[in-house]
Amino acid sequence: MKIGIVCYPTFGGSGVVATELGKGLAKKGHQIHFITYQQPPRLDFFNENVFYHEVNIPAYPLFQYAPYESALASAMVNVVTNENVDLLHVHYAIPHASAAYMAKMILRSQGRNVPVVTTLHGTDITLVGKDESYAPVVTFSINESDGVTAVSENLRQDTYKHFNVHREIEVIPNFIDLSRFKRQQKEHFKKAICPNGEKLIVHTSNFRRVKRIDDAVMIFYHVQQQTPAKLLLVGDGPERARIERLVRDLGIYDQVRFLGKLDAVEEVLSVADLFLMPSENESFGLAGLEALACEVPLITTNVGGLPELNVQGVTGFLSNLGDVADMVKNALYILDDDHLPTFKENALARAKEFEISQILPLYEAHYERVLQAVQPLAL
Ligand code: GMT
């Protein structure tokens, strides 16, 4: 199959899911054409089945906001036409699903029927997408997609709740490549960060408000008062400066390190004892799955799709949003040397349920169904 994949070239979230999906499909012999405005960070290797097409967005003095959606739709039209792409798979509804609809209509006017699959990832539905500035376009483009998937049952339900969507949505969860995300021997790294055998706590995110990093810092603040610990914060984004200030104000700057946007996050997770995800909303929690794969138990909120990933008392604990005291209590329980080994074992066992080899066939089957349903154009 020849598949055009559209995504944001991000270090985490939908960008990573889309890139890993494309890589996995390419290894299985499909031809994958990535269409993005920048090379996705995990697209850093050569494979004969992988192609990259950059969206060109020309500047013009008239544009206060460059019309990215038009440039993207045009790129999709060109790639489909030149490369004979069978199907377009767009990740994150805004504005990819509506740009794909535009591309589909243009291609149809040229006598080519190319179906569009839209994968809903999270904030495209739960936060920004439902804002009335975008909602009509998001609703229309979901309804007009030929196939729609959501990364959790919770996100599927949220889509029906917030939008006038009347079509089938298939749940295909996020997945993990266990050959990359596995506990590696990085003891020298652990020694450098935790020279006195401290417990290592990690949070990774795009540093947006929805991640509630201040809760992560407060959990760590209370934990380290009762057990020696260090905190690694991986990622960057709008919250970074505020969080750095909070860490300084709490007087724990020496115990906290900001690592920025790390690509090899599995190396950090390999030496971690606990992962914090106190998010306000999380449709799935891919970063949490990456932690589980590296045998790191989770402290999360019980919002969104997190209960579909984190199993209470088995792979970690879930608390109500903002209940820092409960998260501290649970973190100390997990970090107890009598409990930690079991949680680590359970974490890996849970991650195995989301192994990429089990999830890719679900996408392939979804594509097959969508392609079979495409009506030939009347001549
Ligand atoms: O909002 C983000 O954090 C980024 C966003 C994205 O689409 O890039 O992440 C969402 O998609 C991920 C991949 O499917 C999910 O694992 C995340 O839970 C989800 N984030 C939120 O729902 C906040």
Image (spheres, grey):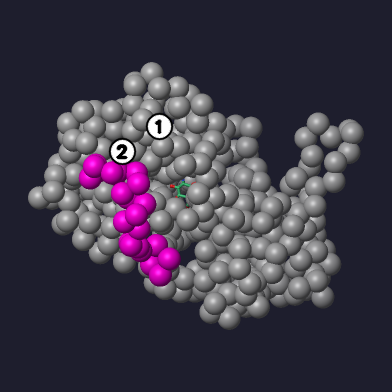
Q: State the residue position of label 2.
A: 230
Q: Position of residue 8 (x, y in %)?
A: 61, 51
Task: Relative to 273, say whether 211 is above or below.
Answer: above
> Can the viewer see residue 371 in this picture?
yes
Q: Tag on residue 212?
A: 1
Quadrant where the C terminus sits is: bottom right
Q: Work out how far the residue at label 2 is from the one at label 1, CA to CA, in angstroms.
A: 19 Å
Q: Please tell me which residue lies in front, 363 or 107.
A: 363
Q: Please tell me which residue lies in front, 120 or 62.
A: 62
State the SS at label 1: loop
Segment tinted magenta in the rendering: 178-201
Q: Position of residue 135 (x, y in %)?
A: 59, 38
Quadrant where the N terminus sits is: bottom right
Q: Is residue 186 magenta?
A: yes
Left of 13 or right of it: where is 179? left
Can you tell which quarter of the image residue 5 is in? bottom right
Q: Position of residue 17 (x, y in %)?
A: 51, 58
Q: Amino acid at mark 1?
A: Arg
Q: Please tell me which residue lies in front, 341 or 305.
A: 341
Q: Residue at x 21, y 39 (%)?
A: 331
Q: Is residue 124 magenta?
A: no
Can you tell which quarter of the image residue 227 is in? top left
Tell how many labels: 2
Q: Tag on residue 288?
A: none
Q: Residue at x 80, y 71 (%)?
A: 82
Task: Relative to 23, say whether 231 is above or below.
Answer: above
State the SS at label 2: strand
Q: Residue at x 38, y 41 (%)?
A: 232
Q: Earlier in the sequence, mark 2 or mark 1?
A: 1
Please report contact status of discs 2 and 1: CB closer than 8 Å, yes or no. no
Task: Relative to 255, say whether 54 is above or below.
Answer: below
Can you tell which quarter of the image residue 277 is in? top left
